[in-house]
């Protein structure tokens, strides 16, 4: 019983660490977009090289879209359209990062096999 508890604790620690790495990678891609503007290949490269952990991918690929800010996030809109608050729709970039992981415990347990994080940033 003690060994199972130890393995489960270790598995949880790995999952938390990897989730933080994926979130940091997505944030690095968003920071790249903020600093250098829209460059899909550059943003994807920033995501994959952000952490020393191998296997982090910019999946799905970064997306440029126009939208309006709202309470729940950014809603898609036509570029140049007028938003509900009277402002003009702005350009945003959505950056995603994912990492596929293998668990230490048997696959019959309801543990995630893929960790995914996203970050959205507004371009100047």
Image (tube, grey):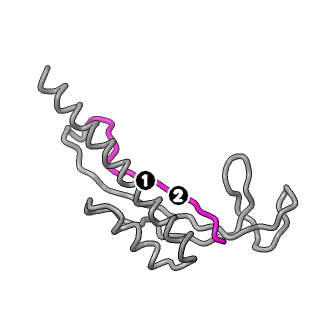
- In this rendering, the answer to whether 23 lies above or below 36 is above
Q: Is residue 102 above or below residue 123?
A: above
Badge 1 vs badge 2, beta-carbon distance below 8 Å: yes
How many residues crowd mark 2 within 10 Å: few (<14), some (14–19), many (20+)? some
Say left or right for 82 vs 26: right
Residue 31 x, y percent position in the rendering: 51, 65
Single out the residue that lies furthest toward the left: 3
Q: Quadrant of residue 74?
A: bottom right
Q: Which mark is residue 119?
A: 2
Residue 116 left/right relative to 3: right
Residue 58's x, y, as percent? Answer: 41, 66
The stretch in magenta equals 108-124
111 vs 122, left or right, is: left
Residue 121 place in picture, x, y as percent? 59, 62
Mark 1 lies on residue: 23
Return the mark for residue 113. Answer: none
**66 left or right of 107 in image:** right
Under tag 2, what secondary structure? strand
Quarter that holds the C terminus: bottom right
Q: Secondary structure at mark 1?
A: helix
Which label's residue is closer to the chain start, 1 or 2? 1
Q: Quadrant for residue 14, please give it.
A: top left
Quarter of the image for the N terminus: give it. Answer: top left
Residue at 32% in and 39% down: 111
Magenta stretch contains residue 26: no
């Amino acid at each position: 019983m003690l060994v199972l508890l130890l393995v489960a604790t270790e598995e949880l620690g790995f999952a938390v660490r990897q989730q933080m790495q994926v979130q940091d990678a997505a944030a690095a891609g968003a920071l790249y977009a903020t600093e250098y503007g829209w460059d899909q290949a550059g943003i994807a490269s920033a995501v994959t090289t952000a952490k020393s952990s191998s296997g982090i991918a910019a999946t799905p690929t970064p997306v440029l879209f126009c939208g309006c800010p709202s309470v729940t996030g950014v809603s898609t809109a036509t570029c140049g359209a007028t938003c509900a608050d009277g402002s003009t729709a702005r350009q945003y970039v959505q950056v995603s990062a994912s990492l596929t992981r293998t668990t230490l415990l048997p696959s019959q347990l309801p543990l995630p096999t893929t960790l995914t994080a996203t970050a959205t940033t507004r371009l100047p």
